[in-house]
Structures are given as C-alpha cells and as structure tokens.
Image: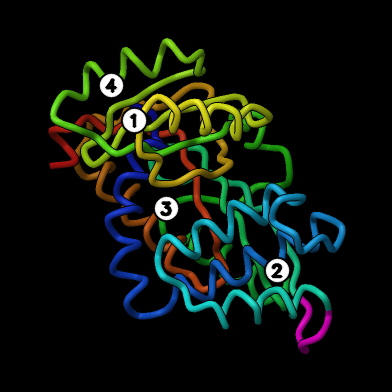
C-alpha cells in the first residue's frame, strides 16, 4: 500500500475529529474558493469538476450551507480577503518525498512557517519541480467495505480501474483523473457505496521504512504539516509496514 494510501487512512480517521472543532470547515471553504477561481469563476458544480468534489466533501462532513455559500461569495470577490494556492515540495525524515498543498492570504508568512516545519521535522524544503516528478495525478474513490472485501476488490478490478487497494477502513479505487466521474458512476451502478472522491498525487515509487523511530518521525512530520491552518493536503512516497503502524 502506497504512502498516500496509508496516510489517507490515518487522515480519514483524524478528519472526523477535526470536523468537530471546525478547522476542517475552514480548509474546505478555502478549497471551494480556489476551485471557483481555478475554474474561471464558474460556481456551478456540474460545470466545475474541482468545485463539485470540494462541495461533495463539505456535505460529507455536514459543513453548514452558509459556510459553503460564504466560500462561493469570497471566490466571486464579494468578501474581503484574497487567497492563493501554493504547492510546497521537499524531503522529510528518512528521505521521503513530500508534497504539501496550501492556500494562503500571505505567501511570505506561510512559506516561512512551512520551511520551519520541514527543518524542525528533520527535512528540507526544495524548489518547484524537485519532487513533483516522483508523483502522478490520479482520481481516488473511497468505497465502503463489506463482509467480503476480497470479492469487492475482484469485482472492482473488472470495471477497468487503474488500481485497487484495501485499507483498514475502506477500499481505495484509483483511476485516470479524466475518468474519475465515469468510474464513480460505474461503481455506484455495480452496487458499491462511494464514500468520497478526490483528485490526488500518487507516488510512482515508494520508500520502505523499516525503522520504527523513523516511521514515527515521518508520521509526526506529516501530521504537523497537515495541522497547519494553511495546508490543504499532504502527500508522501513512504511505505510503512502494518506492524510498525500498529
């Protein structure tokens, strides 16, 4: 299972706690605003795929409708405060490649804080493009597991998806980014419950971490990055064996 997959599992379990204190509402609100801007100002989710994914995620965690509407108004310039999207690249503990996507209204402040997090975590921030080539874009759909996940995986593979991985809490289905909507519809028609859909950066190769101390440092580093208010998502190319995760 890839680094993203394992981190995604941990993140999903953690996100439900974040939602209770509201931090995730702010992050998804920013994601909605950026999706509108990236889509040329289109606020119709049916015509703006990135926006549709952001709104679906907002609804999945019961984000209030007024929060969604506020994010849309902000994207249209009806609320004060300009924000921009920044991608940070670098290396973390154990030499793992890290991509961190941020949204900020103060690039200099955020960059200084992220650089500090990398250095304190035993890593280093690099320039644009130094790490990104180690990842590829992919569509990720999270499917609810039933009592026979092995049969689910085989059935899903017959749908022509790129990859399927069984996580501890769900089944993760990977597809070509352009085919995400089609694959999602096929999954639903086949009787699967799709819990979430997103566009991710999937590592092309992974670094296997066998040392428990390094594994702990990597996970703590990932968590510290993701807990930063401006960070939207974090991806890594590490592979930590299940026995170490436990």
Pick whichever of labels 2 and 4 is earlier in the sequence.
2
Q: Nearer the viewer, mark 2 or mark 4?
A: 4
Q: CA distance from mark 3 to mark 4?
A: 40 Å
Mark 3 and mark 4 in contact? Answer it, CB < 8 Å: no
The tally of labels here is 4
Question: Dividing the image into 4 quarters, which one contains the N terminus?
Answer: top left
Question: Circle 2 sits on which residue?
Answer: 33
Residue 95 at x, y percent in the picture: 45, 37
Question: Circle 3 sits on which residue?
Answer: 122
Pick whichever of labels 3 and 4 is earlier in the sequence.
3
Of residues 208 and 28, the one drawn nearer to the viewer in this rendering: 28
Pick whichever of labels 3 and 1 is earlier in the sequence.
3
Asked if one can make out residue 72 in the rendered structure from this viewpoint, the answer is: yes
* Above or below for 92 versus 96: below
The numbered mark at residue 239 is 1
* Above or below for 150 versus 183: above
Q: CA distance from mark 3 to mark 1?
A: 18 Å
Identify the residue shown where x is 58% and y is 31%.
Answer: 138
Left/right placement of residue 150 relative to residue 36 reads left
Count residues near mark 2 (Cα–Cα under 10 Å), then give few for <14, some for 14-19, many for 20+. many
Q: CA distance from mark 1 to mark 2?
A: 33 Å
């Amino acid at each position: 299972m890839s680094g993203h997959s394992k981190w995604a599992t941990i993140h999903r379990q953690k996100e439900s706690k974040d939602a209770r204190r509201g931090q995730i509402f702010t992050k998804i609100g920013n994601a909605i605003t950026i999706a509108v801007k990236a889509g040329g100002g289109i606020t119709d989710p049916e015509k703006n795929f990135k926006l549709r994914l952001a709104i679906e995620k907002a609804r999945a965690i019961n984000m209030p409708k007024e929060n969604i509407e506020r994010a849309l108004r902000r994207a249209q310039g009806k609320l004060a405060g300009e924000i921009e999207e920044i991608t940070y690249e670098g290396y973390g503990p154990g030499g793992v490649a890290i991509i961190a996507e941020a949204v900020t209204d103060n690039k200099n402040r955020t960059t200084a804080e992220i650089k500090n997090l990398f250095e304190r975590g035993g890593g280093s921030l690099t320039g644009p493009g130094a790490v990104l080539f180690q990842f590829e874009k992919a569509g990720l759909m999270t499917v609810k597991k039933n009592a026979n996940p092995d049969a689910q995986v085989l059935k899903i593979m017959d749908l022509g998806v790129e990859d399927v991985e069984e996580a501890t809490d769900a089944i993760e289905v990977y597809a070509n980014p352009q085919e995400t909507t089609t694959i999602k519809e096929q999954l639903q028609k086949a009787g699967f419950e799709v819990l979430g859909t997103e566009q991710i950066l999937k590592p092309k190769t992974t670094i296997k971490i066998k040392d428990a101390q390094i594994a702990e440092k990597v996970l703590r580093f990932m968590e510290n990055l993701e807990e930063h208010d401006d960070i939207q998502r974090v991806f890594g190319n590490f592979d930590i064996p299940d026995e170490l995760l436990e």
